[in-house]
Amino acid sequence: MRYGMNLLMWTDTLTDEMLPLLDQLKQIGYDAVEIPIFDADVDKYARWGERFDQLGLLRTGTAVRGADENPISPDAGVRRKGVEANKMTLDCCAAAGCRVMAGPFHSALGEFSGAGPTEDEWKWAVEAMQEVAEHAEKCNVTLAVEYLNRFECYLLNTAADGARFCREVNHPRCKMMYDTFHAHIEEKSIPEAIRALKDCLVHVHISENDRSTPGQDNVRWKETFDTLKEIGYDNILVIEAFGLALEKLAAATKIWRRMYQSEIQLATDGLGFMKAEVAKRR
């Protein structure tokens, strides 16, 4: 197993001010970082790829889509923008040395119709992801599509939704991720949710029910780690926690207050928790 930390805890863009933090995360014991890819600048991410190599940190990328680039919009022009935006994100991932692009880039974050997905919206999502997956193959990057809770999206809300989506996209580069926060809200059974993704799971977010330090609140951690062991998952576990740094995502994350002692405390304790849970099941 490898262990990563999502940098959205601190920032939604990479700057030189992040370098001491990255060194600290490496010293704490992280193998990888998950980097936000919210701007279309391939050269920038190539430079950062070299820096991550120097630091000895693996990386995964994460991205979201907005209303003006929604892959399931009724406007064909907007859908096209969504596909092209996902392709550009893949180019940036490849430049940075990311082998996984994770996130809810299947539809617009926080955009609602007032109902569940229509047949057309589902068809558009599948068709868009098929094209994006073809580009992912060229980039040597695997898509880790994320299902979200009902308060953040309406296309994919459960593991069963995600498994069906992967089957219909039917491309080896289109896989799923599992996020303990969203599952805590939406799933009737944590073991059954994880089992549903057995054949397509490539990425896991470890996230507490209040988005703070993993292991200190109400997520069903024993069931989570037991079932990940059962299905043979041995890839990467990434902590996704949120603080007060993300003005662009505040409407989705709903983080208005500080729920941890410090970001480094959260990262340190969270890593210790993940490693201890994995070690119990060896």
Image (cartoon, rainbow, N blue to C red):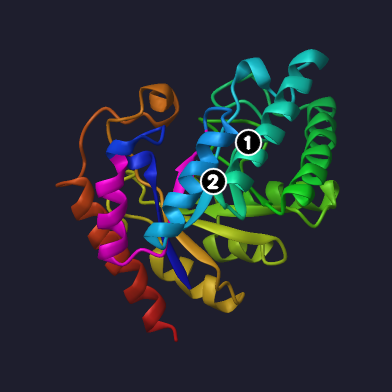
Badge 2 density bin: few <14, some 14–19, many ≥20, Cα 10 Å: many
Q: Secondary structure at mark 2?
A: strand
Q: Residue at x 83, y 38 (%)?
A: 131
Q: Report x, y in % for residue 183.
A: 51, 50
Give the tally of numbered discs.
2
Badge 1 density bin: few <14, some 14–19, many ≥20, Cα 10 Å: many
Q: Is residue 22 magenta?
A: yes
Magenta-tinted stretch:
18-37
Residue 146 visible in this rendered orientation of the protein: no
**Most foreground residue, 89 or 184:** 89
Q: Residue at x 66, y 41 (%)?
A: 90
As drawn, the label of residue 61 is 2
Q: Residue at x 63, y 31 (%)?
A: 154
Looking at the image, is 67 positioned above or below residue 204?
above
Q: What type is the residue that disc 1 sits on?
A: Thr
Q: Mark 1 highlights which residue?
A: 89
Q: Report x, y in % for residue 50.
A: 48, 51
Quarter location, residue 132: top right
Quarter location, residue 200: bottom right
Q: Is residue 97 left or right of residue 54?
A: right
Quarter location, residue 25: bottom left
* Outermost left residue: 261
Q: Secondary structure at mark 1?
A: helix
Q: Do labels 1 and 2 touch, CB within 8 Å?
A: yes
Residue 122 visible in this rendered orientation of the protein: yes
Q: Is residue 152 left or right of residue 141?
A: left
